[in-house]
Amino acid sequence: MNSIKLTLRQEEIIKLVKNNGPVTSEALAEKLNVTRAALRPDLAILTMTGILEAKPKVGYIYSKKPSYSLVYEYIRNIKVQDVMSNPIVVDENTTVYDAIVHLFLNDVGTLFIQNNGILLGAVSRKDFLKIAMGGTDMQKVPVGVIMTRMPNIVFVEKEDTAYLAAQRIMEHEVDSLPVVERVFDGSKENLKIIGKISKTNITKLFVKLGEAN
Amino acid sequence: MNSIKLTLRQEEIIKLVKNNGPVTSEALAEKLNVTRAALRPDLAILTMTGILEAKPKVGYIYSKKPSYSLVYEYIRNIKVQDVMSNPIVVDENTTVYDAIVHLFLNDVGTLFIQNNGILLGAVSRKDFLKIAMGGTDMQKVPVGVIMTRMPNIVFVEKEDTAYLAAQRIMEHEVDSLPVVERVFDGSKENLKIIGKISKTNITKLFVKLGEAN
């Protein structure tokens, strides 16, 4: 991982500003026993990275929100393929009961329904709970009958950003999105399911971003 | 929000490096029609922020992972109270059936069980689905019987970091954590529920971090 390598003097400046509130460049120069001119490049680096903020006529203050644009840029560079996991799939003739067992065995929140790898639909834990409450004969009804069917499923492709995936998850209020690849069968375009990205993947990514490196 | 304000020349340098792979400072100076000395401060800023990487004897390359340490610092500054939402609570005598209805009406994944604001337990969508599959009489059994009971519930406090919450969510494989406040009743410490933080809150936060500002 790349990271800013601050010099000892820059670390010292940060400490002085952090502990003493607004500090002018004159005061910093005096405390560090250097000229103001000598400090200029360090202060430029520290303000451009957003670690310090320069308030005119007040001095330098420590910023609690460093480098927002870099966080933004970093996050926008993470792709779906970097964080996606394997989808748990069943075919449409599986009974609802067996599908729920499958859901528990794999400890996932959403099952994807496929035929020869082609995405047909999805069923979430919430959908299953609704069905279980409704008195449907779960041993007889196939999952294909209760699934949300294409084209009513929001998806992403592996080259999309994890940011876009998270945005779609929030906007469409779902827990998980299938990751698909477009395949052509004659003139018809089908969507092959190759992965999934869920709130769990995003939470895991968030933990990774906050980890010491 | 603070952010790095790149100069036009810095933006130009990034573009050149992005499009032309490794570029030496000589080549950059020539393309921009300036001296190498004039470019030095810009290149210093761009490498220190991690946007560019300097490879000895190769040149500058565009880094896909800028400023990891700043991302890290930024993320570690976000607190639970900045992102938590209201908990949906029922009391322990509520029937399982009514609790599930409550879950659907509020469109949440986890219900917290309380008595006078004190946290007693939690039940997730997954727990409910298990009960629904098991043939329990949901109209008769109170939710207090099937809940995961304190002290077996992982929680956070509002001053904890969102990072810690995400970490606990992943480690304990739950969707949601209660946010509690310690209250003292004589010598006994109780936990008052004041919020919740879930994978949904973390996903929403991730989207916010990736938003243009």
Image: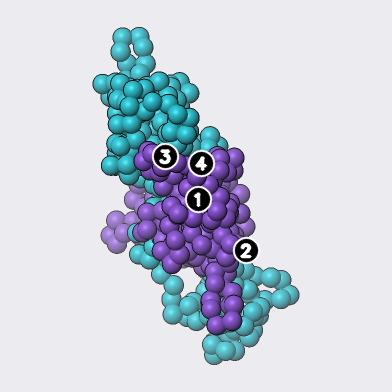
Chain colours: A purple, B cyan
Percent of width and height locating residue A184:
58, 77
Q: Are marks 3 and 2 on the same chain?
A: yes
Q: Nearer the viewer, mark 2 or mark 1?
A: 1
Label 4 CA crowd tier, 10 Å (few <14, some 14–19, many 20+) = few
Q: Which residue is mark 1?
A: A142
Q: Which residue is mark 4?
A: A139
Q: Residue B64 bears which disc, if any?
A: none
In the image, taking residue B40 as reference, residue B99 lies left or right, namely left
Q: Residue at x 31, y 59 (%)?
A: A55
- Distance from label 3 to label 2 (Cα)? 28 Å
The kind of secondary structure element at disc 2 is loop
- Distance from label 4 to label 1 (Cα)? 8 Å
Q: Which residue is mark 2?
A: A116
Percent of width and height locating residue A166:
44, 58
Which of A25/B113 is in front?
A: B113
Q: Which badge, 1 or 3, is on the more N-terminal residue?
A: 3
